[in-house]
Amino acid sequence: MHPVIPYVIAAVLFGLGCYGVLVRRNAVLMLMSVELMLNAVNLVLVTADTTARATLPSTGGVFALFVIVLAAAEVGVGLAIVLQLYRLKRSVELDSVSLDGAISTPGAASTDGRTSTQSGAPAAKVTTDRGGAAS
Amino acid sequence: MTTADVLMIALGAVAVAAAGAVVSSRHIVRAGLWLVVTLGSVAGLYLVLAAELVAWVQVLIYVGAVVVLLLFAVMLTRAPIGASPDLDRSRWPGLLIGGGVGLGLAALLVDAYRWSTVAVGPSAGAERMGAAIFRNWVLPFEVLSILLLSALVGAIVISRPDVGERSTPDKGHPYESRSTYDGEGRD
């Protein structure tokens, strides 16, 4: 068994998870990408069981179990936050959450179309939100 | 190239392709279902690496609970059923950073392990993992139970329907306004 194969798979999964966190606008899709990264880490931990000669046996597998538990707890709390955000703003688009605490008016649909023409730079969207928001 | 290698390459190809579909699909619900495929193939990789308990816990908790929770959130946030055109920000920063991270880690690991061979150890079933956890890792196990309790309580507290009313600054401290509810049975 060549351990470089699962290690490279884990590295590619981690890179894909990073890409998803940075690119996806929907909060639930971002949480899915975080799950990809956690799975990559778990794969490294389980593969390390075979390559590293640890003092305590199966340490990698035990840590992988702990990471699974942590991921489940994180997804629970994270989705509670996302649902509360949806209750307040009728949209889970992360770019419309202004960082200074002002609650901007939600878009017409659940994914509002006004942000589709602007690319990158969430700071530009924050200033336009502050101009139009009734706080 | 042993059978384990071929299996790992096949499962890895499925996992990477499904993960690519998760981060690039235009349908939100389909991204969740591609995540099921990714997590299932990673569980298959755990089985090839002889970590049986981790594989079954992965299927049970990740595929069975976490993905279901994510799909519930997709439904409760009224995600559109068809394709959404504006699900992604501009892709180039993400491609640079994600690609750089993935390539950097892959280069590091390839440089460390090259084409070396290891023997897959004895299968880490429930008995061996249970012995390892309850002999060496009891304290983290118990602390994890406290963490799960706090995550449960935290999720319930965040989901209360009256959290949004305290966002205006002139209502004072949130717990002061709650004291006026004495005896009226808010719940």
Image (cartoon, coloured by chain):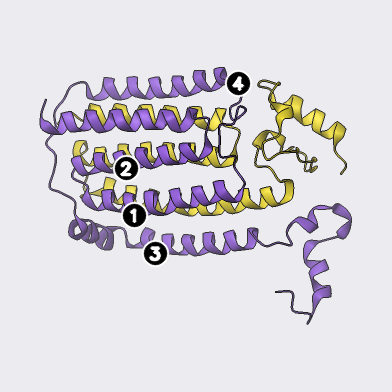
Chain colours: A yellow, B purple
Location of the C terminus of chain A (image quadrant): top right
Q: Which residue is mark 3?
A: B142
Give the CA distance from mark 1 to mark 3.
Answer: 21 Å
Sequence-wise, the earlier of marks 1 and 3 is 1
Q: Mark 4 vs mark 3: same chain?
A: yes
Circle 3 Cα neighbour tier, 10 Å, few/some/many (<14 / 14–19 / ≥20): few
What residue is disc 2 on? B40
Residue B157, x across and y down, in percent: 63, 62
Residue at screen point 12% across, 47% down: B122
Q: State yes or no: discs 1 and 4 in contact (Cβ < 8 Å).
A: no
Q: Chain of mark 4?
A: B
Give me the C-alpha separation between circle 3 and circle 2.
28 Å
Disc number lying in front (4 or 3): 4
- Same chain for mark 4 and mark 2? The answer is yes
Secondary structure beneath dot 1 equals: helix
Q: CA distance from mark 4 to mark 2?
A: 30 Å
User: Which mark lies nearer to you, 1 or 3?
Assistant: 1
Give the residue pinned by disc 1.
B60
